[in-house]
Amino acid sequence: MDDLKPRPANSSPLTPLDFLERAATVYGDCPSIIYSNTTYTWSQTYRRCLQLASSLSSYGVSPGHVVSAVAANIPPMYEVHFAVPFTGAILNNVNTRLDARTVSILLQHSESKLALVDHQFSSLVLEAISLFPSNINPPRLILITDDDYASSPTVDSNFCCTYEGLVEKGDPNFKWVRPQSEWDPMILNYTSGTTSAPKGVVHCHRGIFTITVGSLIDWSVPKQPVYLWTLPMFHANGWSYPWGMAAVGGTNICLRKFDASIIYAMIKRHGVTHMCGAPIPNKEPLRNPVHILTAGAPPPAAILSRTESLGFIVSHGYGLTETAGLVVSCAWKHQWDVLPATERAQLKSRQGVKIVGFTEIDVVNSESGESVKRDGLALGEIVLRGGCVMLGYLKDPVGSGKCMSDDGWFYTGDVGVMHADGYIEIKDRSKDVIISGGENLSSVEVEAVLYMNPAVNEAAVVARPDEYWGETPCAFISLKAELKKRPSEKEIMEFCRARLPHYMVPKTVVFKDELPKTSTGKIKKFMLREIAKAMGSSRVSRM
């Protein structure tokens, strides 16, 4: 068989972009996107993406360039997941919850050539651009408008054209740029936008193809589901489901903003079958079951039980920006259905096993590098190996080398255990990351801001369970003894709000005479976590 070698007929680079072309053929007259009073079919979406790609190319966007998108879960945000890489360029979705300083840092670091900006975030981006040094060229700006937009000459003058204008003048017969190699970069996402040294995660066509197919299989997504976009598309590209919905010809229900009442209204109106994000219980049972995929911090057992009693079918998983989506899931076994509700919730809260198509996961001792005992007790670092692990961090070979060593593993920095049945469970996060509404935030960075307050003597931030967001930041503070006036909880929150993105601001502040410490003076965060947990779930409706 030595003469049987790869040939052009069997060596086409893997890319998820093919999914849209196929959807236009198979599901051409079926709805692809529904937003407010607008409905597109899959043939229309394909045509619009080609037209947009054509216009972007005419603006000088070419392979290797970075194009940023700053938008809510609206149709253009869905379309850019195909249209931008159709030009050979790299898509960079920007977290809309960040402040202008951070957005400016990310746009500079990525060397973004062009930014597609939702009118709702135009002031954010314009302020970010104003912070650019004079020797760095900012990206050209394209304004995304809809029926809610009130024309503003002051705003419009900063944009070279509108998104719809680009679509209208584009060529519907544009020949989109196929990757020369499946290892060509396709996506740039940032793990954190809260430091001056951001980590830009770069994914290739092969990796996105792999995570998309694996995610569809693992969640058992059928053909033509109705998918409600409650998970921000800027968050790890919505866990790969923009491409996944094209692969199965699903209907994307887009929302500019949402809360529990809006979500329930959309479920009723459109017959939603699938959604991602934190479980959002209500009092009203569903008419038909809805599958919900959640990740990161496991939902509290009480919330999980209540959510499922209303008709939601909850699946739980684990992934990182560096894996482009969820690569571990709590694969459910039918024999667990007969167990008591509390026991089922405990099993479902575990992160689980590798998804189909992923290579290997393990929990290893940080010193020896050997696998820990499968007893659900021995702590170690979670390590991963698979086709959707990132190419590396942009402009950061040292950081890439630290987490992807020569032994062939990606080191997550997350601490967990391996159970006897091969299911992993996260017990802690080595960098004290809090997962709130699907967003990762560093407690260390919140603490740094708290310590800027002249009244604060000690500060520690941990996760507190929240019924809506999964987790919210809870700050434990001791104040300086010489204070004449003690700040209130509200004043501490306002101090942080002036210096942090709103989602990072502590939602609970607890004052203590002294924080618990080890013999070496290190604050015992594990004790504070237990206190925060014992306080019960907070009920933060928005951030």
Image (cartoon, rainbow, N blue to C red):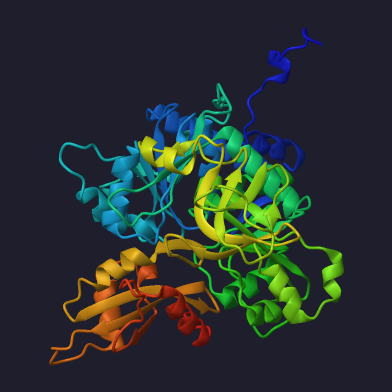
Residue 37, given in percent of the width and then of the height, sits at: 58, 61
In terms of depth relative to the viewer, which is nearer, 69 or 388? 388
Image point (58%, 54%), residue name? 319
Q: Quadrant of the C terminus?
A: bottom left
Residue 114, given in percent of the width and then of the height, sits at: 36, 39
In terms of depth relative to the viewer, which is nearer, 82 or 519? 519
* Residue 168 shows in this picture: no
Residue 381, given in percent of the width and then of the height, sits at: 54, 55
Residue 136, given in percent of the width and then of the height, sits at: 21, 37
Q: Is residue 528 above or below residue 327?
A: below
Image point (51%, 72%), residue name? 469
In this rendering, position of residue 1 left or right of residue 543: right
In this rendering, position of residue 502 left or right of residue 310: left
In terms of depth relative to the viewer, which is nearer, 373 or 473? 373
Q: Quadrant of the N terminus?
A: top right
User: Would you identify the image quadrant in which residue 430 lies?
Assistant: bottom left
In the displayed image of the protein, which residue is found farthest to the top?
A: 3
Q: Is residue 210 above or below residue 153?
A: above
Q: How many marks?
A: 0
User: Would you identify the image quadrant in which residue 347 lies?
Assistant: bottom right
* Residue 522 shows in this picture: yes
Q: Is residue 372 above or below residue 350?
A: above
In the displayed image of the protein, which residue is found farthest to the bottom?
A: 484
User: Would you identify the image quadrant in which residue 432 lies?
Assistant: bottom left
In this rendering, position of residue 423 left or right of residue 402: right
